[in-house]
Image: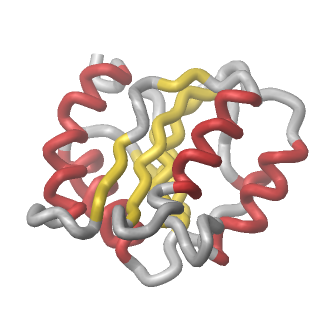
Amino acid sequence: MESVNIIVGSQMGSAEYVAEQLNDKLNDQGVVSILHDQPVFSEINHTDTTWLVCTSTYGAGDYPENLIRFIDELSQCNNLPSLKYTVIGLGDTSYDTYNLAGRKVDDLLASKGATRIDERLELNILDEALPEDTALVWLDSWIEKSGLLG
């Protein structure tokens, strides 16, 4: 069975918490997943695998500090034709840079030839529902679209 690499970009902990909840649910459903809260591109399988990138946006549309090195290395790779991925972005709609980091990493992965499994999930921290609750509900349909269980 294919594994899922959950790549976390989190400055204040919200994206990390969402990613941890997704990791637990994937494991509970029999999907092997690996959480990378300090991701290093060269240490994460990027051949015949699935990435779930869960990132917040920091400052004026920037990547969280823990994701910058990963993004720099990803930017330098030639192509990733056997990689499948989906991005989850966390942001605040009161900012004009809402979910910009998630949008940028989604575009970057697409430009490297990776295959998007599902449209980017954008979570607004101002919504009534908790971001992790929305993501957990979404995860069931994502698992089905990814074909991870069968």
- Which image quarter is the N terminus in? top left
Which residue occupies 36% across, 69% down? Answer: 94
Residue 17: x %, y % from top left: 33, 71
Q: Position of residue 80 (x, y in %)?
A: 74, 28
**Where residue 110 sits in the image (x, y, percent)?**
66, 28
* Quarter the C terminus occupies: top left
Residue 4: where, in percent of width, then height? 46, 41
In percent of the image, x 53 and y 61: which residue is there? Answer: 97
Q: Is residue 35 visible?
A: no
On the picture, is 79 further left or further right than 107? Answer: right
**Residue 144 position (above or below residue 68):** above
Q: Residue at (67%, 50%) from the top-left corner?
A: 44
Q: Could you tell whether 96 is left or right of 105 in the image?
A: left
**Res 41 visible:** yes
The extreme bottom residue here reads 12
The part of the image, by quadrant, that contains residue 43 is bottom right
Label total for image = 0
- Between 147 and 105, the residue placed more toward the observer is 105
Which residue occupies 78% across, 66% down? 69
* Looking at the image, residue 134 lies above or below residue 82: below
